[in-house]
Amino acid sequence: MRSAVDGAGARLVDRTEADAVVAVGDAALREAMRAAATEDARSAPILPVGDGRHAVDPDRGTERVAGVVDGLGGSASAVDGFSRIAHPVLAVDGAGDAPRRFAAADVAFVTAEPARISEYGIAFSDGESVSVRADGAVIATPLGSDGYAAAAGGPVVSPGGGLSVVPVSPFTTRPDTWVASGGVRVTVEREEEPVALVVDGDRRGTVEPHRAVGVEVATTVDLLSATAE
């Protein structure tokens, strides 16, 4: 990748000064997207390289990096030969004393003890609310909707299609899933032990019963996708 950048006459700089970001692998992509949601990070389009459905095949990664550098032409507003697809980054607020968290893929509420059923209240931005008994609940962006949320029975969502909201192992024979057009608020409703808050696959604290946690779109980040040749 470094040789592709050098060969195109560009240079590597700090991410906050970049006109474009190359993210190799899922972990790097999520880190770059979360960074774009912070106040001190400059928004720049991201070229994902890896195995994901939105990523460039690694075998063509070097070629695509050179294409991005050539396409930028010194401007971050347009990249010739690539389409820019906006993907949301989620903000998580209200989880105890924990600072605001950001998620590129998903936010999950999971019981700390195996096979223990909790009850979750889920309130949607349109005023609808539901209560479900389950091992957990997950809210996924389109980027993350084919991961944990899909494994739990949720839909795979296209960019711009909303957020996938899915109970995990619900205590019912006919579970519901939802695609939310806006943010949601999740509350552990039963008097019991706290549940774990998991952000992009990493545990980020706990959620106390009866304390609402808001999950909403904080910003969108453009991912670069090569146009058809």
Image: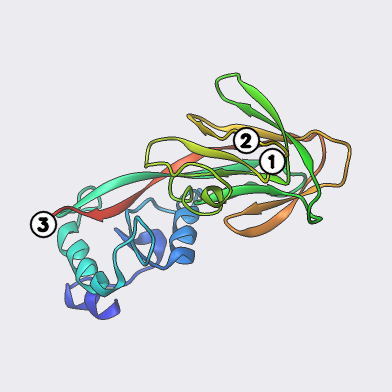
The residue wearing badge 1 is 170
Residue lying at the far front in this picture: please name it.
173
In terms of sequence position, does the residue under pointer 1 or pointer 2 come before the other? 1
- Image quadrant where one finds the N terminus: bottom left
Q: Residue at image x 40%, y 67%? A: 14
Write the residue at 69% across / 41% down: 170
The answer to whether marks 1 and 2 mark residues whose Cβ atoms lie closer than 8 Å is: yes
Q: Which residue is mark 2?
A: 175
Sequence order check, earlier mark of 2 and 3? 2
Amino acid type indicated by mark 2: Pro
Disc 2 + disc 3, Cβ < 8 Å = no
Residue 126, relative to residue 120: is it above or below? Answer: above
- Please tell me which of labels 3 and 1 falls first in the chain: 1
What is the CA distance from the residue labelled 2 to the residue labelled 3? 43 Å
Residue shown at 56%/53% (left/top)?
148
- In the rendered image of this protein, does residue 222 appear above or below residue 27? above
Instruction: Provide the residue designation for mark 3.
Output: 229
Graded by Cα atoms within 10 Å as few (under 14), some (14 to 19) or many (20 or more), the crowding at tag 3 reads: few
Density class for disc 1 (Cα within 10 Å; few <14, some 14-19, many ≥20) is many
Q: Is residue 83 above or below residue 1?
A: above
Which is nearer the eye, 125 or 59? 59
